[in-house]
Amino acid sequence: MQYLKRMLATTLCAVTALSSVFALSACGGDTSSSNRNKGPKDPAKTITIASGEGGNGSEWLYTLADKFEKAYQEEGYRVNVLEPSNDMAGTVALTDMARGVEETGTDMYFISGINSVDAVGEDGDYGVLAEDLAEIVFNQPAIGYDGEEESVLISSKIRADRMRYSIDKHGKAYGFQYNDTVSGLAVNMKKFNKYGLELPKTTNEFLQCMQTIYLGTDTVPNAENKKGHFPITYVGGNNGYVVSALSTWMAQYDYDAYEQFWSMHETDAEGNVIKMETNGYEVFKMKSVEEMLTVAYAAMDVRAAAYGSTTQGLDQAQAQVMKENGGAVMMFNGSWMMNEVKLNWKNQVNDITFIGVPVISALGTKLMGNGTSYNLSDEKCDEVLSFVIGLVDENKEIDEMITAVKEEFDGLTLSEAVVTEIARARGFVYVRGVEALGLINKNTPRKNIAALFLRMMASEDFAQTWYETANSAPVYSRNLDLSKASTTFVREAVKISLNKYQVGITGPRNVNGLRESLGLRAIFTHTAHIPSTISTGAIVSMFDGKGNIGKDAKGNALTVQVYRDAAKKMQETEYNNAKKYWKDYYKNAGLPIPEGVN
Amino acid sequence: MEQEVVKHKIVKYSKFEKRDFFFAYALVAFPILQFLVFWVYVNASSIFLAFQTETGEFTLLNFKAVFSSFTKLDTFGLDFGKSLQNSMTLWVINHLVCFPVTVVTTYILQRKIWGHYLWRVCYIIPSLMGSVVWTSLVKYMVSYDGLIVNALVSIGMELPEMVLRNGLFAAEETAFPTLITITTIMGFVGNNAVLTGAYSRVPDEIFESAKLDGAGFWREFISIAVPCVWPTLATLMTFGLCGIFTADANVFLYSNGTGKPGMSTVGFHLYYITYQISMRGASNSAFGYPAAIGFTLTMMTLPIVLIGRWALEKMQEAVEL
C-alpha cells in the first residue's frame, strides 16, 4: 500500500513537473518561434514586431517579413515576428509601448483599437510613444520586394483623407496606415437571386428589396414562412456595423452639414467659421438627420429582421446570412467579414458578395426633385440617381456620366454640380481601417530598419500581397490584379475601396471643434446607440408580422411613412434633450458657460 | 529590568523558526501591498476625483449632477433612478426572499433527506459555472426558440411579439422580470456551499439530544441550527448589505452591453458611464461624475451596513461549538 502511494505520488509529481516545464517553455521561450526564417540573427540588425491579429489575419506579416529579409540579405537585416495576438490592441498595446523598447525589445507595432493617433503622441496618456514617420517613411519612396526604390514618394501614394488619421494634433505623423476597409452590406446571392432582384444602389431600392424578400414572390414564400428568408439581420447590442451606415447616409445627403454635425461649427456669410456655442444643439434638427433616421428605422425594422436579431452576437448574425435555409439575405457588415466567416463556412464563402452602403434616396429628390430646375418625380429621381451610381461604380468621368444620363433619360441634362454631388456621395465610405496603425517604438536603435520595413509595406508589391492574404484593400496602391481575389466578396469589397471617387469617413472618430471640447462623441447625446434603441424599442414596421403589408386603424395599407414618423419623433426628443442639457455639457466638460446659455 | 533581559534571552528563535517567520511575513506582505494599492489608493483616488472638474479644480458639480440624475435622465441619456430601482428590487428579492429560503433548503439537505446527494449536485453545479457560461446558457433558454418561450407558448400563454421574435430579454415587458427570475434561481443556490459547511460543523449529538427531548424538525432548525450557524449567517447578511448598490446581476452579458430594454442596474450603470467616458478619450478627471455616484452610494450604504451589522450582532449571541 505504502509502495503504491509512493508510486502514485511520484507519477503525479512527474506529470506536474513536465506539464509545468512545457507550459513555461511556451510562455517565455523563444518568441521568434513563429517566424519562418531560421538561422542566427544579429540583435543590432533584427527588428522585433508585435502585432494584433484582427480580421485580416497575420499571413501578410510573415510574407512581408520573408520578402524583407530576402531583399536585405546582404545587409543582414532580419525580422522577428512575435506571435500575433488579439490582445495586442488598444490600451494593452499602448501600455506595452509605454514600457519602452529596452524592456520589451519590440521595435514596431501593428495594432488596432486606438481611437486616434493622438494616443501615441504628446496628448496621449503616456506622452510620445512612437517615432515621427514624416522624414523616415512618408517623405521617402516605397521599396519593392527586389529592394529597389519606387519613383514616387510615399506621401504622394496615400490619399489626404487617409493621411489625416496618421497625423496627431501637433502635426506629427506617428501612424502608418495600411488597411483600407469598407463598411456596407454582405448579401447572400444564393438566397437573393431567388427573388429576381437587382442589388440595391439607393436606399429606396434597398427598401424595395427588403419589402419583396419579406413578402415573398410566386416562387419563394414570405419571410414568416419557414421556407422563406428574412431580408435583413444585424448584431444586437451596441455593435457599430449599422452605425457605420448611419454616418454614411448623413454624409451622402449633405457633406457640409455632416461636417457641421460633428464639429458644431458653422460658417457665416463672410466665410468665417464660428463655434455654435449657444445653439450647438441645432445640429440635431438637420434634415440629413431626419433622412438618416428614416432609413435607419426601415433598415432595423424588427419584423423584417430574422428572428433573434436584436439579441444575437456577431457569429450568430453572420450565420443567419451564411446558412442556406431560413435566416436572412443581407447584413450590415464590412469587408473584413470574409476572414471571420471562412473558418466555419468555408463551403459557402462564394455564396456571398459585398455591396457599398446604398446611397440615400433623399439626395436624388434634393438634387433633382420638386423645387429644382429638373422637377422630377420622386420615382424618377431615384431612377436617375441609381443610374448615375452605376456609372460611378464603373469609375466613369463626370462628363461621361452626363452624356450617359442624357442618352438614357430622353435628353435629361444634369449639371456637372449634380453629377459631382452624386459621385461624391457614392464615394463616401465608412472606413474602420483607420483604427489599424503601424508604429515604430520611440527611441528604438533599429528605427531605420523598421522604417525600411514600412517603406516596403507602402510598395506596389506589398499592395498585391495585402490584397491576396489579408482579403482587404491596400492604402498605398490602386493598381491591383483583382482577378486574384480569394472570393467574389473580397473582389467586390476591394473594388469599392479602389473607386476613384472613394473618400473615407469615420463618423464619431471625426468629432472635432466644439463638439470634441464638450465630449459629445456619439451621434446623439441622449440616445447612446441609435440602432439598439430602434431595435429594442416599440416595434415600428410597415409589415404585419404575418408576411403581409400592415394596415392602419382605418384599414389603409401602411407605407414607409411609419418610419419617417418614428424618425421625426426620435429626432425631436434628441433635439429637446440636447437643448435642455446644453448648459450641463459645458459644466461636465469643465468649460466656462458662454453668455446667452441658460 | 533584569527580568526583562532574561526574557529576551529566553525568546531566541532558531534558524528554522526565523526562516518560518520571514516566510509568514512574506506571505502576508503581498496581500497587504495589494490592499494598499488596489483598495486604499484606488478608493482615495476615486474620492478625490469626485470633487474635481475635468480641469482638476475643486467642485461640487459632480454631486449636483448625481442628485439631479435621481429624477431625470443624466447627460449620458441614462435613467439612474430606474437603475437604482432595479438594483433595489433585485436586492430585496435576493436577500429577503432567496436568502431565508436558502438557509432552510440547505438545512433540509444537510439533514440528509432522501435523494439529498442529487439535490446537492443540482444546487452546486450552477454556482460552479462561470458567469459567461451560465449567462450564455440562460440566454439560449430564454431566446425566441428556447426551452422557456416554447414551454410558455405551448401552455397557451400570450407573449408579446417582441418575445416571440427575439426572446424574453428583448421586450420591455419581460426583460426585467426574466432577470429577476434568473437572479432568484441563482440566489437559491448562491450560498449553498458556504451554509453547508457551516451546518456540517454543528455536532450531531446536539440534534440527537434535542430529538430525545422531543424536538421536532422545525424546533431543531430554529433553536439549534440557526443559533449554531448564526456567525456565518450574520457575515453573509453583512456582505449582502455591502453589495446593496453594486451587484450588477450580469446585466452586461444578458443585454449585450446595453442595459436595454429596462434592465440596467446600478452596477451596470456605473460600468456603462465609465466606459462611455473612456471611449471619449477624456482625461482621468473626467471620471468625476461616476466617482461622485460611487461616493454617494457609499455614503448611502455605510449607515445601512453599520446599523445592519450592529443589529445582526444584537439579534443572536454566537454559539461556541
Image: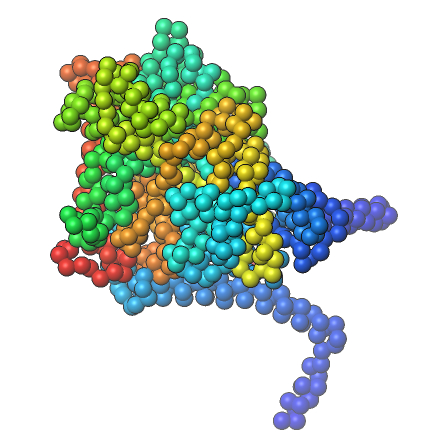
Residue displayed at 39% across by 62% down: B46
Q: Position of residue A327 (x, y in %)?
A: 44, 20
User: Residue A201, position in %: x, y?
Assistant: 34, 23
Is the residue B111 above or below the residue B7 in the image?
A: above
Q: Residue furthest top?
A: A218
Specify the farthest residue to the front.
A151
Can residue A365 be seen here? no
Point out residue A288 in the picture as x, y percentages from the top left corner: 24, 35
Here the colouring is rainbow
Q: Which residue occupies the extreme bottom position in the image?
A: B2
Q: Residue at x 18, y 20 (%)?
A: A376
On the image, which quarter does residue A428 sit in? top left
Place of residue A218 in the rendered image (x, y in percent of width and height, measured from the top left): 36, 6
* Residue A452 vs residue A520, the one in the foreground: A452
Between B220 and A486, the one lying in front of the other is: A486
Q: Nearer the viewer, residue A3 or B56?
A: B56
Residue A37 in view here = yes
Which residue is depicted at the point 34% across and 42% down? A507
Near-viewer residue (A331 or A442): A442
Q: Residue at x 45, y 29 (%)?
A: A495
Tally of numbered tags: 0
Q: Split into 4 quadrants, where in the image is the C terminus of chain A?
A: bottom left
- Residue furthest to the right in view is A3
